[in-house]
Image (tube, grey):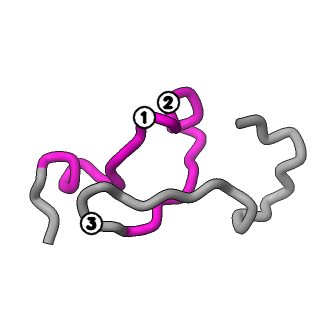
């Protein structure tokens, strides 16, 4: 994903659900290189410690 036209409108960022809790995750710059592989919203969900 490229953010050339990004002007601060976060509504247009990609979203997908967390595999553990189902919470909607919004694209982050730190996930730019591996967005396709991101499955969990947090370390707690990744470790299976979600509520």
* Residue designated by label 1: 37
Above or below — where is 38 with respect to 50?
Answer: above
Label 2 residue SS: helix
* Discs 2, 1 touching: Cβ within 8 Å: yes
Q: Of the residues under marks 3 and 1, which one precedes in the sequence?
A: 3
Q: Of the residues under marks 2 and 3, which one precedes in the sequence?
A: 3
Label 1 residue SS: helix
| Number of other residues with Cα within 10 Å of mark 1, as a class: few under 14, some 14 to 19, many 20 or more | few
Above or below — where is 35 with respect to 46?
Answer: above
Above or below — where is 12 with respect to 27?
Answer: below
Residue at the spot x=56%, y=58% of the render?
Answer: 15
Give the quadrant of residue 7: bottom right
C-alpha gap between disc 3 and disc 1: 17 Å
Tell me which segment is drawn in magenta.
23-47
Residue at the spot x=59%, y=41% of the render?
Answer: 29
C-alpha gap between disc 2 and disc 1: 5 Å
* Residue designated by label 3: 21
- In the rendered structure, the answer to whether residue 3 lies left or right of residue 51 reads right
- In the rendered structure, the answer to whether residue 6 lies left or right of residue 19 reads right
Disc ID at residue 34: 2
Whole-percent x, y for residue 11 in the image:
71, 68
Give the quadrant of residue 10: bottom right
């Amino acid at each position: 994903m490229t953010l050339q036209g990004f002007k601060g409108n976060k509504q247009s960022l990609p979203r997908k659900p967390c595999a553990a809790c189902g919470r909607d995750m919004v694209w982050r710059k730190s996930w730019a290189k591996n967005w396709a592989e991101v499955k969990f919203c947090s370390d707690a969900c990744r470790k299976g410690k979600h509520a």
